Amino acid sequence: MTWFVLLAVVLGVISVAWLTRALWRPSTTLAMTLAVFVFAVAGLGYVGIGSPAHLALVPGAAQPPASAAAQTPTAEQVVAMVDQLAERMKSQPDNAEGWLMLGRSYVALGKHADAVAAYRKASALRPSDANLLADFAYALAMANQRNLQGEPLKLIDRALAIDAVQPKALALAGTAAFDRRDYALAVKYWEKLAQTQPPDSAFGRQVQPSIAEARRLGGMSAPVAAPTAPGAAASSAQVSGTVTLAAALKGKVSPNDTVFVFARAVDGPRMPLAILRKQVKDLPLNFTLDDSMAMSPQATLSAFPRVIVGARISKQGVAMPQAGDLQGFTMPAAVGARGLKVEINEEIGR
């Protein structure tokens, strides 16, 4: 194991322990949802260096073998490795992955001002990376006494404009709204966050108390009931069906790769009218898309008569199509259609 990979492993463990201690305080609003991402921070350290199974520290992943744990360095050695990475970046100013790793390393060590400087360099090189922008916003908020207003919120908005279901950005956006006592908006962001997670996941469970607290403070103690007849028109503004993966492509995916299922207007904006986030392990998947999954209140399924439903597998977990993603689409269908079949059967060219 090289020192660079070892650094990623150790910083992942440190980030879990440090973030839990630093954020999980009942009086700290920012902690309410960011705690959901404690384990995610650990996994993020592997971006750019690969994510071999024995290094994955995210929930449900295999644990490092004993031989890897035995090589865990001391705190002083970890700091020395981070310093070595920082020194290396002086001669590699255009290495976005290196700046990203350095920023995450500083966050894991609680050096948020240093992390902000590293993320700023990384974001200048990769301005359209939603994951990076969300991490940058978090580090900047921590450096500003956990204040998400101002530049952090602008970064969050940029991240969500690129990837409307980026989980960390949704968490932060909800927290920022909660801090402003805009509890309805906080609920909106956090419920969208919950929809991106499998119901039985740790993330999905941990965000529910935050939603309940926002509802209580905003006088929304119970979810609004869905309309019944004669408001049946609202319930018909949905499409449903099944997503499958072509047998020839099964060797190109991993169980935890992200699956986006979405509908977009045949004659209208390219932006999805509704989007659902799952994982390859959920395939074959029965889906229903409706107005509650809209990215914008001005662009919903009920506003258009016909849609195309698509599904895309993203190893990066990014909603925007990337080379190497796998995808499939239906023919145009009327809103209200059921039993649609989406086969993911092609790879986006590089």
Image (cartoon, helix red, strand yellow):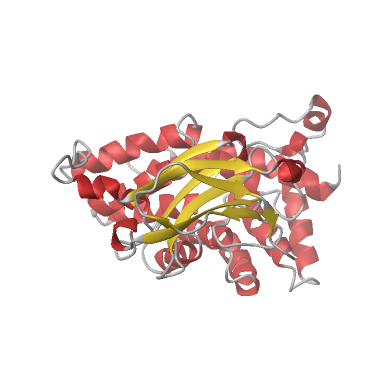
Q: Quadrant of residue 153?
A: bottom left
Q: Residue furthest top?
A: 66
Quadrant in the picture for the N terminus: top right
How many discs appear?
0
Indicate the position of residue 61 as horizontal and vertical percent values. 66, 32
Quadrant in the picture for the C terminus: bottom right
Name the residue rendered at 78%, 38% in the picture: 73
In the displayed structure image, the side of residue 27 where residue 43 appears, left or right: right
Name the residue rendered at 42%, 44% in the picture: 240
Indicate the position of residue 49 as horizontal and vertical percent values. 77, 52
**Residue 178 in view, yes or no:** yes
Q: Is residue 172 above or below residue 28?
A: below
Name the residue rendered at 55%, 47% in the picture: 342
In the displayed structure image, the side of residue 115 where residue 197 appears, left or right: left
Query: Which residue is at the front of the view, 164 or 27?
Result: 164
Indicate the position of residue 265 as horizontal and vertical percent values. 41, 64
Q: Is residue 147 above or below residue 62?
A: below
**Residue 25 in view, yes or no:** no
Name the residue rendered at 42%, 59% in the picture: 307
Query: Which residue is at the front of the view, 50 or 121?
Result: 50
Indicate the position of residue 136 as horizontal and vertical percent values. 54, 61
